[in-house]
Amino acid sequence: MSSIVIRNATIINEGRIFRGELLIQDELISAIGPPFTLETPGGAEIINAEGLYLIPGVIDDQVHFREPGLTYKGDIYTESRAAVAGGITSFMDMPNTIPHTTTNKLLNEKFTLGAENSASNFSFYLGATNSNLDEVLNADPSEVCGIKLFMGSSTGNMLVDDETALKGLFSKVRIPVACHCESEPVIKRNSETYRKEYGENVPIRLHSMIRSREACFRSSSYAVRLAAEYNTRLHILHLSTADEMKLFGNEMPLAQKRITGEVCVHHLWFDETSYDEKGTLIKWNPSIKTRYDRDALINATANDLIDIVATDHAPHTLEEKRNTYFKAPSGGPLVQHSLPAMLELWHRKIFTLEKVVEKMCHNPAILFNIKGRGFIREGYKADLCLFDPDDPWTVTKDNIMYKCGWSPFEGTTFRSRIMKTIVNGTVVYDDGVINEHFRGQKLAFDRKF
């Protein structure tokens, strides 16, 4: 039995910060105790965590690792390594690949790719279409993280806009329906208006006027109405407006909520003033909007109207991104830098460390019913991250691990550094070095209907 003892760490878990140590045996956390109280098994690896913080591994519920079919942008091998470098131990990947993951056969092929190539634990969404309800209903709730529903078109058009199909999904699907909410008619109307004025050279600062607050709220509110009517387990992804916050509540524990929401790191970090510096590098769908919207999202995250912080990691090549407005694709790479960015917001006194861990580690496990992960508990999988809270570093091309080779955070100095990432009891990332022999596991979901 392999063993690791983490000595004298500052542990952040379940709303507490305390000094302690951990014993890992094989894949599991076998004991937690005060400093220097746990017996060290013979041959155990000792990790001296003096001055370091220990948290559960981050669980990212929304990534686009681009495999299969778009692997010139990124793939499971490269992006999962960037993820563990950022303290992420589990990810859930989206279906807008080539081909689209809209059948269980294609879904199982992606699980095989994950088992062969991923440095972190993994799951994959099955994509909904206007005509694949039977496939969706046949998804195994113990293996599939959720059903991805595009109520607004984005990269790789999988738009579901048939009312009968939508009502069939909302009335019959029992596992979480994760929804991209933007109103297609509103976006088309706005696009035509600005195309008439500017042609192809629409200024990027107008992205938030095309992918507007109205487009988001109209779609999100419709999804919430459907979910309320059919008691659907609805999870709205990448919220971006202050208006949408009125659709959510914090009056009950997360495990009892039927309608939940996610915000992405870029919507907490950037606002529309950032377009002048970053240009199309920060073109995302939904768009980055005003400082007022960003502040509302920050407050909603702190006050538990928003349940999860994720990335929507979606790499494109620099050549693609450096295009005219309508030709530049939306999305950007984030998994290596999402936790450092959130820790920077802690340094700025925007979030507490306990809240960062709650939104990035605990709540994804609760919301998706992930079995045995997301917490530092005895008997749980040893998915962990050690970071130094005060070891500044700057994002440069030399330390970016994404296959696309760029980051919207390039030139940013973060004050906290990820030191080690442990996945299933194995140190997979160690201060810049990846364990190339390790492979993650398929996530399991403990769902009772």
Image (cartoon, grey):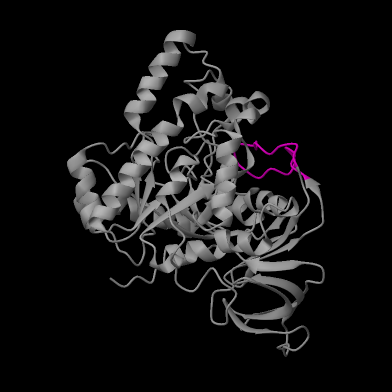
Tell me where residue 141 sits by quadrant: bottom left
Q: Which part of the image, by quadrant, shows the C terminus?
A: bottom left
Q: Position of residue 242 (x, y in %)?
A: 50, 41
Residue 342 visible in rendering? yes
For residue 420, side relative to residue 105 (left or right): right
Q: Position of residue 73 (x, y in %)?
A: 53, 36
Q: Is residue 229 above or below residue 207?
A: below
Magenta span of residues = 394-412
Q: Is residue 69 magenta?
A: no
Q: Position of residue 252 (x, y in %)?
A: 43, 66
Residue displayed at 54% across by 30% down: 283
Q: Which part of the image, by quadrant, shows the N terminus?
A: bottom right
Residue displayed at 21% across by 57% down: 172
Residue displayed at 65% across by 61% down: 435
Residue displayed at 34% across by 70% down: 447
Identify which residue, 138 or 26, lies in the foreground.
138
Q: Is residue 249 above or below residue 179?
A: below
Tell me where residue 2 sits by quadrant: bottom right
Q: Main secondary structure of the magenta part?
A: loop
For residue 379, side relative to residue 180 (left or right): right
Identify which residue, 306 or 6, lies in the foreground.
306
